[in-house]
Amino acid sequence: MNKQEQVQQMTTYMANFVSHIAKVLPDDIIKKLDELGAQEDAPLSKVIYETMKRNQKLAKELNRPSCQDTGVLQFWVKCGVDFPLIGEVEGLLKEAVVKSTFEAPLRHNSVETFDEFNTGLNVGKGTPTVWWDIIPNSDKCEIYAYMAGGGCTLPGKAMVLMPGAGYEGVTKFVMDVMTSYGINACPPLLVGVGVATSVETAALLSKKALMRPLGSHNENERAAYMEKLLEDGINSIGLGPQGMGGKYSVMGVHIENTARHPSAIGVAVNVGCWSHRRGHIIFDKDLNYTIDTHSGVTL
Ligand code: SF4
């Protein structure tokens, strides 16, 4: 394949991948929803979990998105410096989103700010969002694709705490967000928490935390313990599925952190809903791909 053919091939793969994740939830989310549904006793909670399951089945059978809000597309690209299409990736992701918008189809979710004009293509100024990590000595390209729906984006919040607020301050911040806005995001939720220095560093980490597989833990054992404490605390609010009450409010809590300035604690929360549409695909230099979030997919 010449370069132009390679670009076309990767565009098609990414368009098909986006269309697929709009319709089929990741394996770990499906498993977790089954687990939580089995542990709820209240009849209403059980009915909601059964409805979610039926929704997933019908989305697959009818080849339609599993939620009407297919979100704004966000990509986190971890690209090796030697990946042959490194210069083309950002452009082809945009093309892939347009292609998927017509093929899937996806809801039109890109409104030009200040002009209040919906492009109808799911691309606009700065959308889809693309975050880059450049990886030395690598010829692979890893892409996390995420559909940021309106409801699950609403609880997002970031601020910088006084240093004296400590980890208790981080906990209070997270719990305040969850008790005031958690219900908007179609629980059970995946809660991403970023802890760093400034708002933007914490905010980006809180989004990246949502890309981690369920059941994974922060590598620092104290942070992992805090994930567990927050999970128990948010569950005890009793949001239940779709906020209708129940034993479980969350599928998990993931904390991502960096070292920080001693005089500031940047903290942020980002939330994924029960329909947590994220996918992870890895391309080698010849565009062979591996997908580890969804089993049995051929693009
Ligand atoms: S929060 Fe999630 S499940 Fe609820 S409407 Fe938005 S995208 Fe759909």
Image: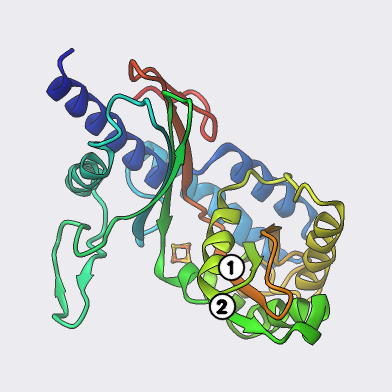
Q: What residue type is labelled 1?
A: Ala
* Residue 5 - label: none
Residue 8 placement (x, y as % from top left): 17, 27
Q: Are marks 2 and 1 in contact (CB under 8 Å)?
A: yes
The residue depicted at 75 percent of the width and 51 percent of the height is 218
Instruction: Report helix, strand or loop for mark 1.
Output: helix
Instruction: Report helix, strand or loop for mark 2.
Output: strand
The quarter of the rendered structure image containing the N terminus is top left
Towards the viewer: 268 or 102: 268
The quarter of the rendered structure image containing the C terminus is top left
The residue depicted at 58 percent of the width and 68 percent of the height is 202
Callout 1: CB less than 8 Å from ligand 1: no
Towards the viewer: 245 or 259: 259
Q: How is the image coloured?
A: rainbow
Please report whichever mark, 2 or 1, sits nearer to the chain's N-terminal start: 2
Residue extending furthest toward the front: 262
The residue depicted at 81 percent of the width and 73 percent of the height is 236
Q: Is residue 21 above or below residue 267?
A: above
The residue depicted at 26 percent of the width and 64 percent of the height is 109
Direction from residue 291 to residue 37 in the image, left or right: right
Residue 124 placement (x, y as % from top left): 19, 62
Residue assigned mark 1: 202
Quadrant position of residue 62: top left
Q: In this view, does 140 lie above or below 257?
A: above
Direction from residue 219 to residue 129 in the image, left or right: left
Callout 2: CB less than 8 Å from ligand 1: no
Residue assigned mark 2: 158
Residue 86 placement (x, y as % from top left): 30, 34
Q: Residues within 10 Å of mark 1 (few under 14, many from 20)?
A: many
Residue extending furthest toward the top: 1
